[in-house]
Image (cartoon, helix red, strand yellow):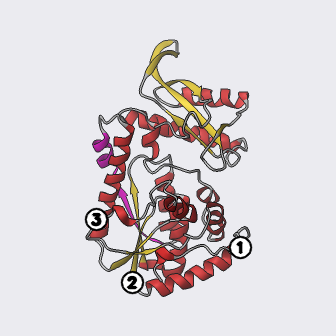
């Protein structure tokens, strides 16, 4: 049966326990082996929840027949590329190709201010890099994807395009392997934990495909991008430390392209501001603003303004969705 025709059974029990996850894993391993045989499978491994769980499942099922390609476009959060290499290559012995394409992406994005144009450049360049790596490999007949059940439903209802192999060049005609396509996101996380993935990877926050590129409004510069990365790392560290890590649906920092006058070390500091965004939601159609304890925000502000180069102010975004969107760009 064509994998794209597989549907979630109406009577399928929700995967909420390690036992149910283990049963699912065993079923999928058998199905993957039957579908793939002794052929090779290619996977774009972003380090996100869905692709990471698919990678772990396939490693368990077919080992070195899986080829993972991790493209670092320079727009990932602090420590993420290193975690992908550590978990998959060093701990799981994955057949992992790591591509540092930071300069390539940032050179293409230089001077580009329009957010949609930035998104298209990042998406298009990612496909180019992935396709170049794929062409270097022999015997690849399958493409694995982290498609999940809400992706299918949303594409069928016309809410968003299904992120499948449609973007790849025509000379790459792969058969799809989508082992978690009948699962909801919460089920994917339960399966990921049972597969032994790190908790902070399995419960990683939603992260846009263009990465920090959409949290660096205006033309992306390396110094401002680094300010976003470092301030975001401080925010995540403090939220985790104070028990907010998994209570708030999404939180991040934004560093827009304008400066204001401040004072550092008794001298004038003409630097950027950092905007903190933290929202709670269940369906992402609407979102409310998270209430952060005042003392914690004071501490986060102190750390960001003293530890991150180029930032002299911290602001908090009180805008719900609507009227705002979750992301800035």
Task: Give the SS element for disc 3.
Answer: loop
In percent of width and height, residue 69 lies at 39, 64
User: Does the magenta portion include 104?
Assistant: yes
Is the Cβ of the residue at disc 3 closer than 8 Å to that at disc 2?
A: no
Mark 2 nearby-residue class (10 Å; few <14, some 14–19, many ≥20): some
Which residues are drawn in magenta? 94-109
User: Does the magenta portion include 173?
Assistant: no
Mark drawn on residue 39 = 2
> Residue at horizontal 55%, vertical 34%?
324
Q: Nearer the viewer, residue 159 or 262?
A: 159
Q: Does 285 sit above or below residue 322?
A: below
- Left or right: 283 in relation to 137: right
Q: Does 109 sit above or below residue 35?
A: above
Q: Mark 2 vs mark 1: which is more N-terminal?
A: 1
Q: Mark 3 vs mark 2: which is more N-terminal?
A: 2
In percent of width and height, residue 19 lies at 73, 75
Q: Which residue is mark 1?
A: 13
> Residue at horizontal 44%, vertical 57%?
161
Q: Which residue is mark 3?
A: 169
Task: Give the SS element for disc 1.
Answer: loop
In percent of width and height, residue 185 lies at 61, 61
- Left or right: 52 in relation to 117: right
Mark 3 nearby-residue class (10 Å; few <14, some 14–19, many ≥20): few
């Amino acid at each position: 049966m064509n994998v794209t025709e597989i549907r979630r059974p109406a009577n399928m029990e929700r995967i909420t326990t390690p036992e149910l996850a283990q049963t699912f894993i065993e079923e999928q391993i058998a199905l993957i082996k039957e579908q793939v045989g002794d052929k090779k499978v290619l996977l774009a491994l972003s380090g996100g929840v869905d692709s990471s769980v698919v990678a772990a499942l396939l490693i368990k099922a077919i080992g070195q027949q899986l080829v993972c390609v991790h493209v670092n476009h320079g727009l990932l959060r602090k420590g993420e590329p290193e975690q992908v290499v550590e978990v998959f290559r060093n701990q799981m012995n994955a057949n992992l190709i790591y591509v540092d394409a930071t300069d390539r992406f940032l050179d293409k994005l230089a001077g580009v201010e329009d957010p949609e144009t930035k998104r298209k450049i990042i998406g298009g360049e990612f496909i180019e890099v992935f396709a170049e790596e794929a062409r270097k490999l022999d015997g690849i007949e399958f493409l694995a994807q982290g498609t999940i059940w809400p992706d299918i439903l949303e594409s069928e209802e016309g809410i968003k395009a299904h992120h499948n192999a449609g973007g790849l060049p025509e000379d790459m005609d792969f058969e799809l392997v989508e082992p978690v396509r009948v699962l909801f996101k919460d089920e994917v996380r339960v399966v990921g934990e049972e597969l032994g993935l790190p908790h902070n990877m399995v419960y990683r926050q939603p992260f846009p495909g263009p990465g920090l590129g959409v949290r660096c409004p205006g033309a992306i510069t390396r110094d401002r991008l680094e300010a976003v990365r470092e301030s975001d790392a401080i925010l995540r560290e403090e939220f985790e430390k104070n028990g907010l890590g998994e209570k708030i649906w999404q939180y991040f920092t934004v560093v827009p392209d304008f400066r204001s006058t401040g004072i550092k070390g008794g001298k004038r500091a003409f630097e950027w501001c950092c905007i903190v965004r933290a929202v709670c939601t269940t369906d992402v159609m609407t979102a409310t603003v998270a209430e952060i304890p005042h003392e914690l925000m004071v501490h986060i502000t102190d750390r960001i303004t003293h530890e991150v180069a180029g930032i002299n102010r911290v602001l908090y975004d009180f805008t719900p969705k609507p009227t705002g969107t979750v992301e800035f760009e």
